[in-house]
Image (spheres, rainbow, N blue to C red):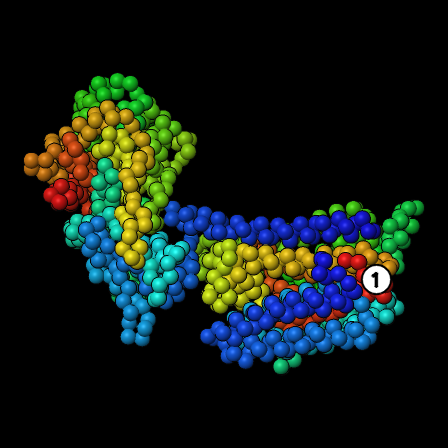
Amino acid sequence: MVFLGGKPKEIELHLLFTAGIYLLIGGILVSLLPGTPAWQGFLAIVTTIGGFLGVHWMWRKRNFHPDPFLLPLLMVLTATGILFLLRLDSFYGLRQLVWMIVGLCVLSLTTSWHHHYRFWSKYKYMVGAVCAFALLAPVFFGIEVGGTRSWLDFKVFYLQPSEFVKLFLVLFLAVYLSEKRYLLMKSSGSMWERFDWLIRQWGPLLGVWVISLALLIIQRDLGMAIIYFFTSLVLIYVSTDSWKWMAISLSLFLVAGIIAYFNFSHVHTRVEIWLNPWQQGLITGSSYQIVQSLLAINAGGMIGSGFGAGYPGFIPAVHTDFIFAAICEEMGLLGGAAIILLYIALFFRGFSIALKAHDDYGALLATGLTVVMALQVFIIIGGVIKLLPLTGITLPYISYGGSSLVANFILMGLLMNVSHCKGDFHA
Amino acid sequence: MHKNIRYLAYIVLACLAFLVIYIGFIPLYISHVQSQSKNGKAAWLNDPRLLKKMQEKQVGSIYDRRGELLAQTVTGPAGVNKRQYPMGHNFAHIIGYSSTKYGLTGIEAGLSSVLLGEGNLELSNPPEGNSIELTIDASLQKLAVSLLGGRRGALVAIEPKTGDILALASSPTFDPNEIDTQMPSLKNDNSSPLLNRATQGVYAPGSVFKLVTLTSVLQNIPGAANRVFECKGSLSGQGFVLKCNDVHGRIDLKEALEVSCNSVFAAFSLELGSRALIKTAQAYGFNRGCDLPINYYPGEVSGNGSMSESQLAFTAIGQGKAVANPMQMAIVACGLANNGMVMRPTLVKRIISPKGETIQESKPEEWLNVTDPDRAETIKDYMVAVVREGSGTRAGISGIEVAGKTGTAENSDMAHAWFVGFAPASDPEVAVAVIIENGGSGGAVAAPVAREIMSRAIDM
């Protein structure tokens, strides 16, 4: 880190510069590909570098000092997504570019609120209600896309409320748990007192949690349901230090999983495909996608076929859930590992922000936001490589998807707000 | 709380690191599944990338052992490459086909990376792949296909000293040049022309399995060759009655093979026990793959040592728990022809670079040791007697000593006709296994086909 020494803002600028070189090379490669017009690559370079430098410049003006590694990491991941989307299908690439601009605007809005980052604590029950309402909306007004009824149709684009609700859920949990963690930890007295304590202190928490989960299960959005469940579980464990709750919740999860396996055909099929996709009846039907993904990763080998030289188009839904398989095919195991390393760096920063936070609320918020991202990355990459049963969610910052990208930019903004510090920076 | 966050961070980062390790194992996993699919244990989906590359690249040609062209790539009018098969239906089940609509099969699928020249260091434009020289002899192969003559059946001929597969025919067959237009009718054809019966057929071996039982008897029961039995036309045991094809009276082991007496082999099998029989079958390559570039389902003896007496007795005469195809039975013949040592069967003789240099050449390799030379010699004598004066006289070639065994495998319809043998007995040049589905008696229907193949192979 010698060359990075100095003020946080200098570090951020240096790293943005490095990310810019990466983007420049990628953008030129995109322009040289026979399938895509040259202007698209240059548009991606100019917009992305311009957008991120703009945010950096604005923060300097406003004297906002977040963790200097976050913005460059965000840029590398988003740029990777845009470059691969332009290579796969420029329709999605250009749309993603627009979503990135929207995301950057929302990011600067979110970070301009950093002085009021405790704002939500006054309205925690309202946040809970918003969660429930936003998840409820698609049940009545939503449309079904790819087997999950979790989308709202806004004509020009589809909105997936569950992507935003994950933020509200983390906000609610962080506020609630930071205020009540000592109350939640103590339980003594007569049976009645214990029962009263259970209802008063745990009630609202469990209520919000159960409603979110039930709705997600009704919408069949299993990936998100699992993310909500584990994020809540982890935050409760971290704040109350209670192994008991952890054990109870995990066994409930196992029971729910077993019931779902035997009663819901879509869950059953997914597990079946995961256990053995190489079955005569499945391979040309429901397990075709995962088999294509594995073949793509296999074709990539160690260093990949090269950017633009593979055939990721054979994988259905390659631009959203399966973009990681495309990266592995063209950039190889090394490229895939590099992407995972970038995420590891991001989460490492997330957890160290949590450890350095000024108060419990900040620590819980940063932990929750990091865990949401980490779960999403682990579940979708695990699904694409057949380590876990596949559940359709996006790879944060890389997969195509407006709701996902904008929501994750807000998430990053919230994390940056927690990390904001005026003093000297120590990496 | 901070301690918990720290632990959580360790767990999360370890999980992500594990993803990287897991991805590293995917190629191993894929090649494992692919080899499972060759033994029929998993379905396989060809990587569509291969087809795409086959169109874009100048894929290597395929030749027979004498350099006759069997497959080549020609560039069509629109610059699209297409595979052409000059020998048409004769090689459909070995070379397979390459179709944008229906994928790849046979050598085209199994050795696609060789044909595409993947891993070749020299770059050429347009990119060229390696050529392949097969061990098959095109004239023998053509004769085999014409002898089967559209009947449902299959034939495999192997050179026992080297393991080179000289002919591998399955009938009925199809023209791989016309696969795109004919596929719908081929798929609906009741006689399944797309199936490679020679390596993927699953048949009751019938009496040809007695060669395996005989090997096991000679190996495990001392003095069996000198014992005399009384065949009363059937053998009854615990809860079963096994019929013989005749009442043979007083008969020894050699005569029992000559006339294919069921009673003797069934009685010996009860003495052997299922473990010993299964062990001998495994020594012959049953329940075991053999690294061919085309799909091969080895013969199987199921029941893992816990067979009932009835199952054991029927298995010993090839009707119970044993199944096999001509490739498996040709391997059995090779073992007996080559003093008890099976050479690894090979289909690819040479791989030739675009510049004409030999990149890889197959060398004879010892594969399975089925029995010692003395016992192999004894069994060979018995088999010579089968052809000289027993059930296999129609496989006899004048002036050459032929060793063989007939089989008439019963099933719900008319029996399958089998013949397994090799010639010349003193110094075998070719081992052959033939099946004609629902053909009737092996001695009458399969033996003449084997005779033609053996005599042509010896003349060459």
What residue appears at the point 24 percent right and 24 percent down from the top-left corner? B374
Find numbered disc 1 in the image and state the secondary structure of the residue it sits on. Answer: loop
Image coordinates for residue B289, horizontal then vertical, percent: 36, 42
Q: In this rendering, would B240 be left or right of A227?
A: left
Residue B50, by quadrant, is bottom left
Image coordinates for residue A71, horizontal then vertical, percent: 71, 67
Placement of B255 over or under A133, stated as above or below:
above
Image coordinates for residue A111, horizontal then vertical, percent: 79, 72
Depth order, front residue of B215/B258: B215
What residue appears at the point 80 percent right and 48 percent down from the top-left corner? B3
What residue appears at the point 72 percent right and 49 percent down from the top-left corner? B10
Name the residue type under label 1. Answer: Asp
Q: In this rendering, would B272 be left or right of A370?
A: left
Placement of A122 over or under B390, stated as above or below:
below
- Position of the C terminus of chain B, as image quadrant, is top left
Chain letter of disc 1? A
Residue A261, by quadrant, is bottom right
Placement of A221 over or under A44, stated as above or below:
above
User: How many numbered marks are there?
Assistant: 1
Placement of B324 over or under B178, stated as above or below:
above
Image coordinates for residue B386, horizontal then vertical, percent: 16, 32
Q: In this rendering, would A279 be left or right of A80?
A: left
| Residue to which mark 1 is pinned | A424
Res B432 visible: yes
Residue reaching furthest left?
Answer: B398
Depth order, front residue of B100/B16: B16
Depth order, front residue of A57/A294: A57
Residue B319, by quadrant, is top left
What residue appears at the point 75 percent right and 67 percent down from the top-left corner? A10
Res A399 visible: no
Judge the density around disc 1: few (<14), some (14-19), many (≥20) Cα neighbours within 10 Å: few
